[in-house]
Each structure stands twice: as structure tokens, then as C-alpha cells.
Image (tube, grey):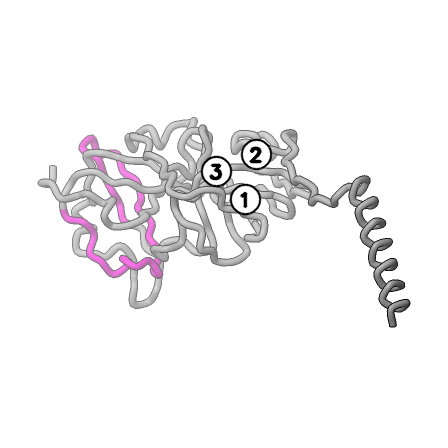
């Protein structure tokens, strides 16, 4: 028995020595650090250069765009869409599925597999897979750009204002709209209501029949409205995020 114990002790000593020797020269495996190729990072302005008006472009490799979400799906006024802005421009993202990404989220978007194009003249990223969208931070809300209706009719609309969060002062719904609701909630049908300013310029407020406020009567007074500005062919349209941003509670002009 003593011989067996001595034999086992020698084996253990040899094993410990071998392991100790191996650890001195062994390099531990570490996971590779994933970095972003700076050449793959694009701005929204770059996207427009890649895809001029009337054309289409599908991404086959990794291309990245960053932005802050200015409108999400939570109100029901848009579906399987997000609007994002970077430092200069904005764009509509059309998703392959509904998301829980929220307004104020800073996101990194890998454009691989998605398509740039124009839907009724509105520039967009289409067929974007949610697996390619990463939320990096939250609570980074963008301030709306103060504009007039006349400015939204300008030649620079597509690059300056399209899909941006804007604020328009001294406006009201036309008198013929006052007995109507923002949309047809009963039939879940989209509707357009006309907003006017004090000099007579007009713009459409387009609301989905699925919006949480679709069946609410339009605001009766004058004041300020904050919304995303979009385009349907040549027609400029406002898309409301929530009723608290329709601040039309002053006397009509």
C-alpha cells in the first residue's frame, strides 16, 4: 500500500510540474475585438449621394449609419417605421417588423441587405432588418427645427427638411376641418386635414386610422404644432407624434 501511495504522489508531482511549466509559456485565448471600419460609416447625406433621386441602391456589404430616433411606432400613427436624424439630415427607415425602439434612442444601423429608394418622392431606407439595428443610448431627444410652411415648399426641401422634426408657429386648422377628427378611427382609415398659417399658406396633416388619437376632434384654436414633415409626391405633409405637440389653444386669427 505504501508503494502505491508513493507512486500516486510521484504522478501528482509530475502533473503539477507539467502544468506549471505550460502556464509560463501559454497564451490565453481572448475574443476578437469587433471594430467598425471607418470607411463603412456613412451620413444620411452620403446615402442621398449614393442614391440620387429616382434611383435605387441595395447594400450587399456592411455599411453603417448613425442617428437619433425622432419618431417611433408607440402612438400607432406609423407602423414598421422609424424616423432618424443625424447632425444634418433625416431619413425614414422602413422595417421588416414592428420594433420597440423608442424616440430619443441613439441607434447604429447596419444597412446590409436594405435598399435605398424613393417612395412617392420620399427618400427612405427600405427592408431594414431589426437584427441590424443596435440601440447605443437613450434619452437623446432632438430639438425641432423652427420653420414656416412657405419654407417647407422650397426647392431645398428634400435635403434640408424631409423627414425632420419641425415646429411651425401661428397656425390653425381651416374652418372646414373643425367638425372633423384627425382620422377615421371607426373604419381605421387615414385622413388628411389642412393646416393654414396667418398669411394663407397651407400644409396637410396626415393621420393614420390606427393612431391612438385618430378619433379625436381636431384642435379648434391657433398656435404651434410640432411634427415630422414628410412628402407624398409634391405634397408636403405633417405626421403628428402625440397630441400634446398640437398646441393650438389660442384664439383663431
Task: Give the alpha-carbon distance from disc 3 to disc 1, as whole Å.
Answer: 13 Å
**Quadrant (top left/top right/bottom left/bottom right) for the N terminus:** bottom right
Q: Is residue 224 left or right of residue 253?
A: right
Relative depth, front residue between 187 and 162: 162
- Going from N to C along the chain, the mark reached first, 1 or 2, is 2
Q: Quadrant of residue 117?
A: top right
Marks 3 and 2: which is nearer the front? 3
Marks 3 and 1: which is nearer the front? 3
Q: Which mark is residue 67?
A: 3
Residue found at x 25% / y 44%: 245
Q: Is residue 213 left or right of residue 235?
A: left
Label 3: element kind: strand
Instruction: Work out which residue is located at the far bottom of the displayed protein and give it.
Output: 1
* Residue ID for mark 1: 125
Task: Give the alpha-carbon distance from disc 3 to disc 2, as whole Å.
Answer: 13 Å
From which residue to which does the magenta span run?
Answer: 193-220
Image mark count: 3
- Going from N to C along the chain, the mark reached first, 3 or 1, is 3
Q: Is residue 91 left or right of residue 7?
A: left
Local packing at callout 2 (Cα closer than 10 Å; few below 14, some 14-19, many 20+) is: some
Relative depth, front residue between 236 and 59: 59
Amino acid at each position: 500500500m505504501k508503494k502505491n501511495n508513493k507512486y500516486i504522489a510521484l504522478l501528482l508531482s509530475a502533473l503539477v510540474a507539467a502544468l506549471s511549466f505550460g502556464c509560463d509559456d501559454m497564451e490565453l485565448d481572448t475574443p476578437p475585438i469587433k471594430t467598425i471600419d471607418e470607411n463603412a460609416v456613412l451620413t444620411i447625406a452620403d446615402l442621398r449621394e449614393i442614391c440620387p433621386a429616382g434611383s435605387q441602391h441595395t447594400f450587399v456589404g456592411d455599411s453603417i449609419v448613425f442617428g437619433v430616433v425622432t419618431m417611433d411606432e408607440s402612438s400607432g400613427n406609423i407602423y414598421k417605421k422609424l424616423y432618424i436624424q443625424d447632425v444634418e439630415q433625416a431619413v425614414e427607415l422602413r422595417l421588416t417588423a414592428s420594433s420597440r425602439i423608442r424616440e430619443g434612442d441613439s441607434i447604429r444601423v447596419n444597412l446590409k441587405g436594405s435598399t435605398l429608394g424613393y417612395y412617392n418622392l420620399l427618400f427612405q431606407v427600405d427592408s431594414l432588418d431589426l437584427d441590424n439595428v443596435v440601440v447605443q443610448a437613450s434619452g437623446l431627444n432632438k430639438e425641432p427645427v423652427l420653420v414656416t410652411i412657405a419654407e417647407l415648399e422650397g426647392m431645398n426641401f428634400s435635403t434640408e427638411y424631409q423627414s425632420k422634426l419641425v415646429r411651425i408657429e401661428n397656425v390653425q386648422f381651416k374652418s372646414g376641418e373643425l367638425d372633423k377628427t384627425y382620422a377615421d378611427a371607426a373604419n381605421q382609415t387615414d385622413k388628411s386635414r389642412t393646416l393654414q398659417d396667418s398669411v394663407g399658406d397651407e400644409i396637410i396633416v396626415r393621420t393614420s386610422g390606427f393612431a391612438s388619437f385618430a378619433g379625436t376632434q381636431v384642435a379648434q384654436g391657433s398656435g404651434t404644432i410640432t411634427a415630422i414633415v414628410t412628402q407624398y409626391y409634391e405634397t408636403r405633409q405633417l405626421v403628428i407624434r402625440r397630441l400634446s405637440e398640437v398646441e393650438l389653444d389660442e384664439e383663431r386669427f
